[in-house]
Image (tube, rainbow, N blue to C red):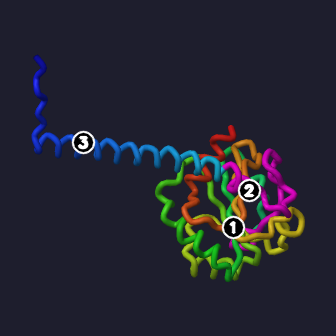
Amino acid sequence: MSKEIRITRRELILYGIAFLAVAFVGVLLGNVFINSRQARAYERQVLTRPPATATIRSGDIFPAMELTDLDGRSIYTSALIKGHKTLFIVLSPGCEPCALAVAEWREYVDRIPDDLSIIGIVNFGPDPALTYKSDTGFPFPLYCDSANILAADYGLIGFPTIVGIDDDGKVAFIREGWQEGFSPLNAYKIIDRGR
């Protein structure tokens, strides 16, 4: 004799809730996986692609070029990048994307890894650079490329341009333009993965 299976209304509701909960978790995990894959693909395709005009490429040793500090003293980029990971962020006055990048990166000052140095480079002299640093609240060291060597000799003409350099002085990536959410921590991961 077969037994009659009876499901109460309460059990049916509980099964329905359990099914919806499992489906919801599945959708969330699927979205996390898809977003992670898309972020990695975006990073490979866009974030590490050098500007079309750049003559510096990933894997090149970053050129030793002369900059000026805010007191007017000369310093070479090779001295700034020696022995640690470096991010150069090339900025220009009046550049709205630059201002957005500076505002966003200020939030990361306390979370920057110890072996990462972030250095701003502006395309004007020390006096306007001091004003720019004060006006924008730029929290990192700032140097001047008043001769505009990065643009004239190396084709880095977009603002902001971010150049990631590894501990050996090799360019890990060049990224032109501001993209919301691209933080110093994202850049650090790209440099670190290149090793």
Going by the numbered disc 2, the residue's amino acid type is Ile
Residue at the disc numbered 3? 18
* Residue farthest toward the right in the current orientation of the protein: 153
Task: Tell me the chief SS of the magenta region.
Answer: loop
Please provide percent x and percent y for residue 139.
55, 67
Report the span colored magenta: 44-72
Task: Give percent across and percent down for residue 155.
Answer: 85, 65
Give the residue number, with chain letter if any, for mark 1: 177
Q: Is residue 70 left or right of residue 155?
A: left
Q: Nearer the viewer, mark 2 or mark 3?
A: 3
Where does label 2 land, which residue? 174
Foreground mark, 3 or 1?
Answer: 3
Asked which secondary structure carries label 3, the reply is: helix
Report the front residue among 18 and 92.
Answer: 18
Q: Which of marks 2 and 3 is nearer the N terminus?
A: 3
The reply to whether the magenta stretch includes residue 65 is yes
Mark 2 → mark 3, Cα distance in angstroms? 49 Å
Between 13 and 142, the one nearer to me in the picture = 13
Horizontal side of 183 relative to 169 (left or right) equals left
